[in-house]
Amino acid sequence: MRMLMKVNLDTATGNNAVRNGTLGSTIKSILDEIKPEAAYFTDDGGERTGYIFFDMKDVSQIPALAEPFFLAFNAKVHFRPAMNLGDLAQAGPGIDAAAKKYGKAGQ
């Protein structure tokens, strides 16, 4: 299942990694293990944040995916299922069925 892992790095821990020159290499090492479909980096609430899209075969992978960020950066890690355009297209019949059954309930 395609997943989105949002990673918020602790600012103080991230600052230390920047100062000692390990921020980029540590993130690269973790991502090399995850082998993501895509990874994007920005800020969220004033924290260094990564949005990492990858395929999760089983929920038992969660600790192996999250622990490196917890240990290296004292990070907050969140997981969410994610769809691409093809997945959304396949969801069409389920959306249509829900609309027919429940679409008038809120009117």
Image (tube, grey):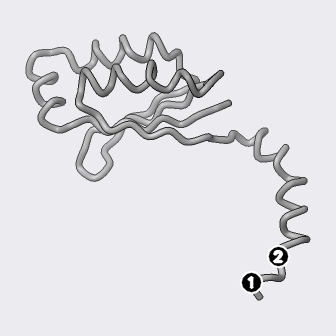
Q: Nearer the viewer, residue 82 or 59?
A: 59
Left or right? Give the position of 55 relative to 27.
right
Label 1: element kind? loop
Q: Is 33 placed left or right of 68 in the picture? A: right
Would you place residue 22 above or below residue 103 in this image?
Answer: above
Figure quadrant of residue 99:
bottom right
Q: Residue at 85% of width from left, 53% of height from top?
A: 92
Residue 28, x across and y down, in percent: 36, 15
Residue occupied by mark 2: 103
In the rendered view, tell whether residue 63 sits above or below residue 82. Answer: above
> What residue did someone put label 1 on?
106
Task: Answer few, some or many: residues within 10 Å of disc 1's Cα (few below 14, many 20 plus, some between 14 and 19).
Answer: few
- The answer to whether marks 1 and 2 mark residues whose Cβ atoms lie closer than 8 Å is yes
Q: Quadrant of residue 96?
A: bottom right
Amino acid of disc 1 = Gly
Residue at the image point whose x is 53% and y is 37% from the top: 4
In this picture, residue 66 sits left or right of residue 93: left
Residue 2 is situated, as x and y percent measured from the top left of the image, at: 64, 32
Name the secondary structure under disc 2: loop
Who is closer to the viewer here, 79 or 52? Answer: 79
Residue at the image point whose x is 12% and y is 30% from the top: 15
Image quadrant occupied by the C terminus: bottom right
Amino acid identity at mark 2: Gly
In percent of width and height, residue 76 lies at 32, 38
